[in-house]
Each structure stands twice: as C-alpha cells, then as structure tokens.
Image (cartoon, rainbow, N blue to C red):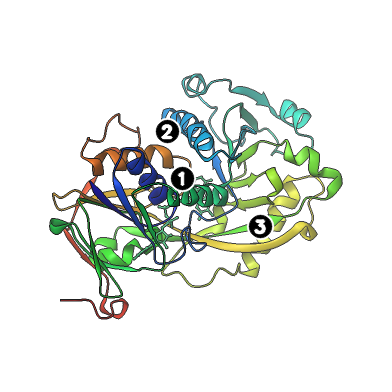
Amino acid sequence: MRIIVVGGGVIGLLTALECSLAGAEVSVVDRGEIPNPEATSYDRHRVLRALHPGAPEAAAAIEAHHRWAEVESRLGADVYHRVGALTVLGPGEPEASAAALAEVPGAVRLDERQTVERFPHLRPPRGSRAVLERNGGVLLADRILTGTAALLAGRPGVRLLPGRRVTGVEAPFGLVRLADGTALRGDAVVLAAGLWSRELLGPDRSDGLTLYRQTQLMCTVPADLRGVWERTPTIPSLGTPEGSWLVPPVAGTPLKLSAAVACRPVEKVTDRIAPDAQRTRLVELFTALLHGFRAEWIERAEDSYYLADSTTHGPVLGQLGEENAWIYAACGGSSFKFAPLIARSLARRALGTGPGVPTGLAAVDRPVRMPGRLRAPDHLISGVAP
Ligand SMILES: Cc1cc2nc3c(=O)[nH]c(=O)nc-3n(C[C@H](O)[C@H](O)[C@H](O)COP(=O)(O)OP(=O)(O)OC[C@H]3O[C@@H](n4cnc5c(N)ncnc54)[C@H](O)[C@@H]3O)c2cc1C
C-alpha cells in the first residue's frame, strides 16, 4: 500500500511513522525542509498535562502520556521531560472537581500556602489553589521532529520529499499535484498542512477557521536560579484572569512565558516579530508573578501562529469526498500533546483498518465531510499539467 503524507509537522511525521511501521510505503511531502522550521510544531517545547478543568480530555491526555513514552523509546532520545504540571486555579475559578482529580493519577491539591512553600519562586494570586500532577511535563518539540524525520529517512519504503509544495488533491484518483507540475499517486492521502490548509481548502471551506497569533517570551534564567527553575513543573495556568502560563527551562531550553491575552486572531501570516505592546504586557504580568523576574532575562520575544475551528477553538479533521483521503485541516492549540493518538487514528484510517479505539477527541473521532477535490489559488500554481 502506498500512502502520501503532506506536511512534515508533528501530525504528518508521526502519521508517516505509524504507516511505515504497519508496512506501508510512505512519501512525506513538505513545501519546506523536513522538518520545516516554519511549521507550528517547530518550537523548543510543548506542554503535556492531564488535568483540563471543565473539559473531557483527561483520559486522552493520560493515554498520550503513555504513547509519548513509546515515541521516546523509539527515537532513543530524551525528548519528554516529566517534570509534572501545576495548574493554579485563581480565586474566582471553580475548584477542580473530585471527579476530575480522580481521573489524574497522582494529582494532589495544594492551597496557596502549600504552593508557595513548594515553589517559593512563584507568587500565585491571593486566594488561589493549585493542582500538582506528577505525570506530564515538557515535550522537546524540535528534537521530536528532527528525530522522527531521521528515523523515517532510514526506514525502507519511506521517501522524504522536502521543497515540494502541494497545489491540489484529486481524492477520487489518489492524486496529489505539486507546484512543479508533477504529481504523486497513492492508495491513500493524509494532509496535515497546518495553517497552510486554508490555501488548499479555498475561502468557502476556510470560513469556519480562525488564524491565531501568539507572543511568547524566551528567557534565560540567571545561573543562581537555574537549579530551582529546572525542577519547576510546567505551569499551564498561573491562575490569573489574563491566562498566564509558563514552560520551565528543561534540558538547555529557555524559560518560556506567555498568556492567553497574548493570543489574538489575525487575517494572515506575516512576520514573527513580537509587537512591543505585547512584550511590555507580558513583562508586567510576569514581574508580578515570579520572584526576581526582570526584563533582562528575555533572550527574545517571538510570535507564532496556529489555525483553529472558530467555534470550538480546537482541531478539524475532514474526509475528502468518500475517498481514503483525509485532511487535518486545523490543529487548534493542543494537537502536539495528542499527536501520537491523532497520528495512530489517521494511520488506521489511511491503512483501511478503521479508526480503531476512539481517541476521546471529538474532532478526530468524528471527521466532517470535505470536497473530494482541493486546489490552491492560481498564483500558487505554476505549470500544473491540465
Ligand atoms: C504558541 C503556541 C503554543 C502551543 N502550545 C502547545 C502546547 O503546549 N501543547 C500542545 O499540544 N499544542 C500546543 N500548540 C499547538 C501545536 O503546536 C499544534 O497543534 C501542532 O504543532 C500542529 O501540528 P501540525 O503537524 O498539524 O502542523 P504544522 O506543524 O504547522 O505542520 C504543517 C506542515 O505542512 C507543511 N505544508 C503546509 N502546506 C503545504 C503544502 N501545500 N505542500 C506541502 N507541505 C505543506 C508545512 O511546511 C509544515 O511543515 C501551540 C501552538 C502555538 C502557536
């Protein structure tokens, strides 16, 4: 069986690996390098935690924790730092329910005093509480992509095709058209084109998708504080109304600081330069939240983008017509941590062995119908055969 995977981000690469491990011949096509430093996936780290107050994703996240351990051992590299996860609940936020806590193995509740005793470098909001998860932590995203691409490159039956832009798909024929006028044909096609999906879907189908741009501060922690910061769990919520979050500086990576208020909808991808106003706002927020934090810690401030369903803010999976062709059309803000589950599900569909065990992620388990033919706008197509 021949499978064409479009996109060398985390979803495309892990899907290609699953297909190859199942014995398929796989071609991975990307408009840039493989992996592509411009992809949403290509960053120093991504966060994995199980507790999602108010959302039914804990079971999927716990499963993802086990699947990442498998990926890690397959890559033979230390890419998942299990520093745990601390979710601080602000004074106005509801308590994590006993049911939610029971789902997360080894999770403990901390009151404000206990939080400060354990993590004296943090200043959680007055009256806050927290949940500390033993599992979860930091996924070293760029190392995962590079390692998976290298693993794929060494596997029989796998072709990596960097620098090829896909301009169209004709699902009934398993045909993937490239900007250089050539085409690839497969028994199944999986598109995981990230924020560029909109080019292939066209304006009508992209209507329900929103592009987000987020500012992040990459910081170097002073040498005398480095030890304590490296042992800090990842903190997906610091309990502030601004939605502040941070990723600790594990394995030589920077301390990363950001907040929900630094994420805004935009029309298109332009540069990655963080606006001064966003930078200043984040500096003010974290000066209040972290002992000793100063703007001098900042190595650089940068913006990145992701595409999400406008209503659910999550991902979108589509089937092209009734064919064995699938498009992971939008990734949302949490597809990295779930990537091994999503990839396994996509691979099973492509291999024709069905979706298998549900992932627990509604968008992945219930794909929507998309047109069987996709075509990029004319200005992106050069010399395509009729
Ligand atoms: C600031 C920020 C923080 C985040 N934090 C987290 C987190 O903590 N945890 C988490 O789980 N998720 C997080 N996410 C979301 C997560 O990073 C994404 O959901 C995930 O990386 C998406 O991966 P992908 O493979 O779908 O897309 P991408 O990584 O964007 O890959 C798409 C690939 O397709 C290629 N491509 C596109 N169009 C074409 C074409 N026409 N022809 C050929 N190739 C093409 C691109 O070059 C690219 O390599 C975050 C996102 C952002 C922006």
The answer to which of marks 2 and 3 sits earlier in the sequence is 2
Q: For residue 131, what is the image quadrant?
A: top right
The amino acid on which the numbered mark 3 sits, given as a three-letter code, is Leu
Give the CA distance from mark 2 to mark 3: 27 Å
The answer to which of marks 2 and 1 sits earlier in the sequence is 2
Viewer-proximal residue among 109 and 158: 158
Give the CA distance from mark 3 to mark 1: 19 Å
Query: At which x and y percent is residue 23?
Result: 30, 40
SS for dot 1? loop
Write down the residue under mark 1.
Answer: 334
Q: Does 370 sit above or below residue 360?
A: below
Total number of numbered labels? 3
Write down the residue under mark 3.
Answer: 217
Q: Does 8 sit above or below residue 84?
A: below
Label 1 near label 3: C-beta < 8 Å? no
Mark 1 vs ligand 1: CB under 8 Å? yes
The amino acid on which the numbered mark 1 sits, given as a three-letter code, is Ser
Write down the residue under mark 2.
Answer: 57
Query: At which x and y percent is residue 278?
Result: 62, 63
